[in-house]
Amino acid sequence: MSETATALSLDDKLTAARTASIALAQASTARKNAGLEAIAVAVASGAERILPANELDLANGRENGLSQGLQDRLRLDEQRLAGLAAATRDIIALPDPIGTVLRGSTLPNGLQLTQVRVPFGVVGAIYEARPNVTIDIAALALKSGNAVVLRGGSAAENTNRVLVELIQGALASVGLPADAVQTIDEFGRDGATQLMQARAQVDVLIPRGSANLIDTVVRESKVPVIETGAGVVHLFLDKTADERMATEIAVNSKVQRPSVCNALETLLVDAEAAERLLPPVLAALHDNGVTIHGDERTRALYPDAVPTTDDDWATEHMSLDLSVKVVDDLDDALAHIRRYSTHHTESIVTNDMATANRFLAEVDSAVVMVNASTRFTDGGEFGFGAEVGISTQKLHARGPMGLPELTSTKWIVRGEGQTRG
């Protein structure tokens, strides 16, 4: 912990963030892009500082029983650092949302109205064991003209401290306020609580992590919250599904990175195709190390499956575990999704256009897919450069959150002395 970090109170940091946000709101696109390039360079060349801190966090996590899924989220290596630097540079290439005109008109009395995008101001973020989020949110906040206050959790405290120091140095090197990105990890849980209560100092709060963390922030925060959600993600194999496509999508959705929120957690299979599809699909999943938790009809076709419990259908495993259920038909699949979905991502594999269109229309989730892996629900994959999180609420933002989702709007009115009669 640096002397500066210990010398400043959390209130001091929030005040400094507000001051920095005023300067950032006026910063040119060129200056913000220069800051992003400096951050990318710092991350790409900072392995000698970042990785030892990350290994210390990983060692602490292993000692404290951190799950394998969270350890994977926590882990950084040269390749992941290069990916973070690349994502930061991708944001440079994206249009600056600030000042974008959304609509406008001239009233009969001659007043000219324009609605434009503006920064929120100070964005707070509470997350856990995800040092990549530190870079992603900092980069997106900078490009959208926001200061950001980060509570990254004790599991990644050493890593996040080094990352924030590198970011602050990068900002200062191009004449931007270093206080635009700050960590409050040193204040522990009390700091998180104070951040949630800082309504006059923080404009919006974004939680990202487990369902328990998100629920706590939504319940206790006095600051407006953009809710990101846990991912009990479903894939439905329709009776017309192609076997090869179903197998490849199921395996990729579950196996490619099982610890993240867009990984598959529940596989639903139409009873009419279960005998045809389940054996090859589940065999491929098993060959990739997946433990199958199956209902009675699944186990009749795949005896090696572990019997499911009622809790399995509502569980975000974040591991190589998959809940599998044979459903009667599309109606049964839709009913199951309505009951257990966290409204994150759901996908269907089908060759029937009417079935696909009905699935798209009736499933109430942030992202609904046809014949595609659920792993594509991601800001980077959607072309946003990175993401703040994946919003599962319906107000302001829904789905992967990029630059526009970190803005508000204001109305600009230009007149020539008009008064209201």
Image (tube, rainbow, N blue to C red):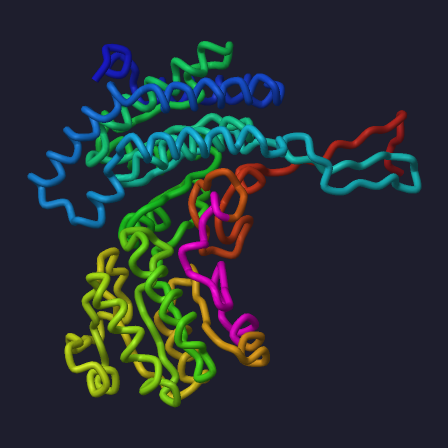
Considering depth in this image, is 57 or 272 the residue closer to the camera? 272
Magenta stretch contains residue 376 = yes
Asked if 82 appears above or below 209 in the picture, the reply is above
Residue 22 position by quadrant: top right
Q: Is residue 144 visible?
A: yes
Is 321 placed left or right of 337 in the picture? left
Q: Which residue lies furthest to the front in this view?
A: 244
Residue span colored magenta: 359-381
Asked if 314 appears above or below 277 in the picture, the reply is above
Asked if 361 appears above or below 170 in the picture, the reply is below
x 48%, y 68%: residue: 371
- Give percent across and percent down for residue 74: 24, 39
Quadrant in which the C terminus appears: top right
- Give percent across and percent down for residue 377: 45, 54
Is 303 placed left or right of 63 in the picture? right
x 37%, y 74%: residue: 339
Magenta stretch contains residue 323 = no
- Give percent across and percent down for residue 1: 21, 17
Considering depth in this image, is 310 or 45 the residue closer to the camera? 45
